[in-house]
Image (cartoon, coloured by chain):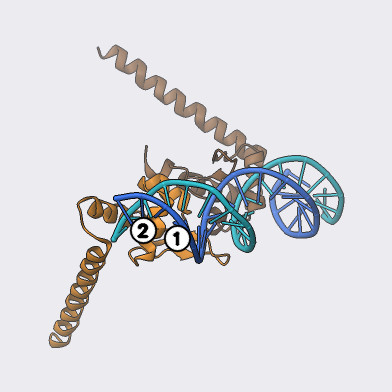
Chain colours: A orange, B brown, C cyan, D blue
Amino acid sequence: MNYKDKSILTISSVEELTGLTARQIRYYEQRKLVIPARTEGGTRKYSINDVEKLIDINSKIIEGHSTYEIRQEERKNEKEMLKEMLKGQINAQFRR
Amino acid sequence: MNYKDKSILTISSVEELTGLTARQIRYYEQRKLVIPARTEGGTRKYSINDVEKLIDINSKIIEGHSTYEIRQEERKNEKEMLKEMLKGQINAQFRR
DNA sequence: CGTGTAAGGAATTCTGACACG
DNA sequence: CGTGTAAGGAATTCTGACACG
């Protein structure tokens, strides 16, 4: 696991790094766009990757996209990633 | 300023990243080895560089060095860095 | 829909001190 | 000397709700 995937940032640090407000960050979570890890006590912990995602998401919102659209877009990308991975697996089978 | 110099980590994240206890981390600060930034409210904020420093410091302590020795060592290194920088400046003057 | 805000409680962090060795 | 711990208070974060548009 890369350091970029370590969930180590509090929401206030993420506010600072992204320029967003805590309210925005929590709302994007509610819309299932960026789901942070949690401490035992329930405090949100974000990774560097989450920070980058949040910046992207906010850009898209500023461009006029809805959180729903952004979510759908992400879903699509995930599916394509899966397809590619499957292709790779299948090809690997045939090469044996 | 690099992301490594951004003070964004709470002491609990630093505990996780370094494997040290908060007590140790605060003690090294008291001994002037790693001085974190602070929020307005006084909460410590560490950078990635601080994390790396803390790990180094703890290694040296485990090796039997005292915090005083480690501090002196760091002072020496700082002075040498200064010397190098001065050399560079002087050479730059002569090259004109 | 996306964001601001006030409210009350819970989790986190802070400092100074006592302890051991 | 370096670290653990209990104590009390302060800073931070949490959730659910009302508001606007």
In the rendered image of this protein, does residue A66 appear above or below residue B42?
Answer: below
In the rendered image of this protein, does residue A94 appear above or below residue A7?
Answer: below
Residue B13: % across, % down = 53, 55
Q: Residue at x 55, y 30 (%)?
A: B76
Q: Secondary structure at mark 1?
A: loop
Residue C7: % across, % down = 58, 53
The chain containing the residue under callout 1 comes to A
Q: Residue at x 43, y 42 (%)?
A: B6
Which residue position holds label 2? A50
The mark nearer the N terminus, 2 or 1, is 1
The chain containing the residue under callout 2 comes to A
In the image, is A52 to the left or to the right of A9?
left
Locate the N terminus of chain B and report the quarter of the image it occupies. top left
* Mark seen at residue A7: 1
Query: Would residue A47 be visible to someone looking at this image?
Result: no
Whether the residues at callouts 2 and 1 have beta carbons within 8 Å, the answer is yes
Packing grade of label 1 (10 A; few <14, some 14-19, many >=20) is some
Q: Residue at x 51, y 26 (%)?
A: B79
In the image, is B72 to the left or to the right of A43?
right
- Most foreground residue, A56 or A3: A56
Query: Would residue B92 be visible to someone looking at this image?
Result: yes
